[in-house]
Image: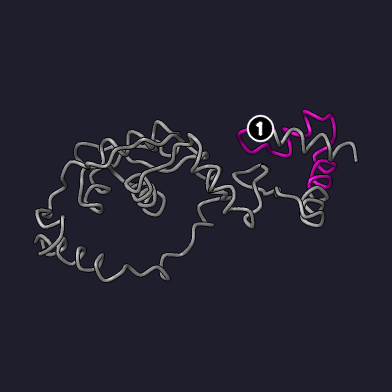
Amino acid sequence: MELKSILESLLFVTDEPLAAKKLAELTGRTENDVKEALAELKEDLVSQGRGIRLKAIAGGYRLFTDTKNRVYVEKLVLSSDFRRLTQAGLETLAIVAYRQPITRGEIAGIRGVSVDSVLANLIAKGLVKEVGKEDVPGHPTLYGTTERFLESFGLEGLNELPELEGFEPDEETQRKIRFRLAGAAPETGSDSAEGSDPKPDSSSETVAAP
């Protein structure tokens, strides 16, 4: 009982996943003892109807709010001075997550707009990082997601990213994609001047990392 209480307190105050080895060092117990206590704690949180859940992510353990209470958590987040990712940030982050390692130019080519400012903000938030150089002339920088990305989205690893096959763009999005691929501008709407070359991204990033 005491070990479970200690572990719950440690996981409550941390802002990153804690590995079983680290928890064992902090508590002076064996890793097996820690893992057994964590398994019991996870079961207790569910059986007692608590508002938090224990999850293993990014090589460690962390507490999260119960998804059943998401609507209330969202009210708090939206009514307070919480800073979130813009749509441009989410789109760019999704491209990096699914296509990594990927260059800045490749990201801009997919989005159809410049991503310099958006990418810089994602890096500043600790969600994206440089992971190397592409072996081509000019050696452009390659980007990928970080451990913090996994933590923020509750993922154990990139293999837990949802499959994209089931996500089909709506008709308007499909129309824009067809025009972009054809090198023409959409006929109507605010995108009528948008061509096939990347343009400066007017979306402002006002969001800090989760």
Please tell me which residue is depicted at 21% across the width and 63% down the height of the picture: 177
Is residue 154 shown left or right of residue 184?
Answer: right
Is residue 68 shown left or right of residue 174?
Answer: right
Please tell me which residue is depicted at 51% across the width and 37% down the height of the picture: 80
**Could you say where residue 116 lies in the image, as x and y percent from the top left?**
25, 37
Q: Is disc 1 placed on a helix, strand or loop? A: loop
Which residue bears the numbered disc 1? Answer: 14
**Could you say where residue 73 lies in the image, as x and y percent from the top left?**
58, 47
Residue 181 location, quadrant: bottom left
Is residue 188 shown left or right of residue 27?
Answer: left
The magenta span reads 13-38
Q: Magenta stretch mostly in which secondary structure?
A: helix
**Could you say where residue 32 lies in the image, as x and y percent from the top left?**
82, 43
Q: Residue furthest right?
A: 1
Vertically, is 86 above or below 194?
Answer: above
Near-viewer residue (110 or 22): 110
Quadrant where the N terminus is found in the figure: top right
Task: Say which amino acid is labelled 1.
Answer: Thr
Q: Is 111 part of what is drawn in magenta? A: no
